Image (cartoon, rainbow, N blue to C red):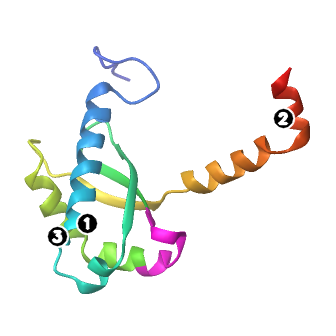
């Protein structure tokens, strides 16, 4: 297996992180402004939490959640229906050789954050943290 001479760690490279953040900001702006001509998608308020990019920068996975955490199915149907138009709109803001394929996954970060807060509020955990 060939090794990348610029990056030999297990995590993403700096370029992947930079491109992922650029795609996240661009996708958030596109969804916020309502640039896509789908009233159902424009009606939804979608938060783009993170975008991870494959090492070849051809696939971008966006972790999204609807406002309030409801209507996941409706959100994913609208995103899938408009996937090519979203890809085109995002690629306008990028200076990459290829427009990355967009994939959408549910962002569970907020749920894990609530669980972490609940754990830290327990008496036994709080007692251990004070020592």
Alpha carbon of mark 3 to alpha carbon of mark 2: how far? 49 Å
Alpha carbon of mark 1 to alpha carbon of mark 3: how far? 11 Å
Badge 2 density bin: few <14, some 14–19, many ≥20, Cα 10 Å: few
- Residue under label 2, please give it: 126
- Residue under label 3, please give it: 85
Relative placement, left or right, of 70 versus 33 is: right
Measured from the top left, where is residue 36 in percent x and y? 18, 74
- Residue under label 1, please give it: 31
State whether the magenta stretch is mostly helix, strand or loop: helix
| Mark 3–mark 2 CB contact (< 8 Å) | no
Alpha carbon of mark 2 to alpha carbon of mark 1: how far? 40 Å
Quadrant location, the C terminus? top right
Q: Quadrant of residue 104?
A: bottom left
Measured from the top left, where is residue 61 in percent x and y? 36, 52
Q: In which quarter of the image is residue 21?
A: top left
The mark that comes first in sequence, 3 or 2, is 3
The mark that comes first in sequence, 1 or 3, is 1
Stretch of the chain drawn in magenta = 65-74
The secondary structure type at the circle numbered 1 is helix
Relative placement, left or right, of 15 versus 91 is: right
Quadrant location, the N terminus? top left
């Amino acid at each position: 297996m060939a090794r990348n001479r610029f990056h030999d760690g297990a995590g993403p490279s700096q370029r992947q992180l930079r491109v992922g953040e650029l795609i996240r900001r661009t996708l958030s702006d596109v969804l916020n402004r309502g640039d896509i001509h789908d009233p159902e998608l424009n009606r939804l308020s979608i938060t783009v939490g993170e975008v991870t990019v494959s090492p070849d920068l051809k696939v971008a996975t966006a972790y999204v959640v609807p406002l309030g955490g409801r209507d996941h199915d409706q959100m994913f149907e609208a995103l899938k229906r408009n996937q090519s138009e979203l890809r085109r709109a995002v690629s306008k803001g990028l200076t990459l050789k290829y427009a990355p394929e967009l994939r959408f996954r549910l962002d569970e970060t907020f749920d894990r954050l609530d669980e972490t807060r609940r754990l830290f509020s327990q008496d036994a955990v709080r007692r251990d943290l004070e020592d």
